[in-house]
Amino acid sequence: MKKNRIYKSNKNNHSVKKAARALSIKRTLALFSFSVFLIAALSISCFSFWSQAQMNDAGDDSKEVVLHKYYTRIEVQYGDTMWDIASRYYSEPYYNYNSYINEIMLINRMLEPELTAGSYIIIPYYSAELIL
């Protein structure tokens, strides 16, 4: 009867060892998978930072000009039209002459684009120069 017990305990012991080995393999595979994922994620991140830095370095040759918006007051001369003023002061940030004229009218609370000689109007303009 003792042999039977020993045999049973050896069989149980073997099953426990087999289960422990299987669990150990699962943990090793999980750790390996996580490590591969982490290395891949870090590699992608480093590559994207590197490529962004390369793009920024390429852009250093052509410095972007920063434009500042200002306002000035001008006297309307005889014969001036809104189109004349727009053609003198219009700059790139505006979509077109109509949008620029609409802003002048809005600033000066004008309902119509008609000007009177001798009157003053405020006009916006853009400049790369920073005026303090």
Image (spheres, grey):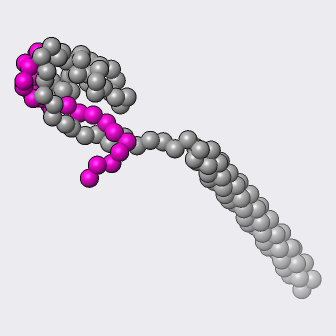
84 lies above or below 33: above
Residue 8 horizontal/vertical position (percent): 86, 76
Residue 9 horizontal/vertical position (percent): 84, 79
Pick the front one: 85 or 99: 85
Asked if residue 41 can be seen in this view, the reply is: no
53 lies above or below 26: above
- Residue 64 vs residue 53: left or right? left
Query: Which residue is found at the position 19% from the left and 36% from the top?
Result: 72
Residue 122 horizontal/vertical position (percent): 15, 32
Picture quarter containing residue 108?
top left
Picture quarter containing residue 96?
top left
Query: Which residue is found at the position 21% from the left and 27% from the top?
Result: 103
- Residue 70 vs residue 106: left or right? right
101 lies above or below 13: above
Q: Which residues are magenta?
A: 107-132
Residue 43 horizontal/vertical position (percent): 70, 55
Q: Quadrant of the N terminus?
A: bottom right
107 lies above or below 115: below
Pick the front one: 28 or 58: 58
Could you tell me how many numbered marks the image carries? 0
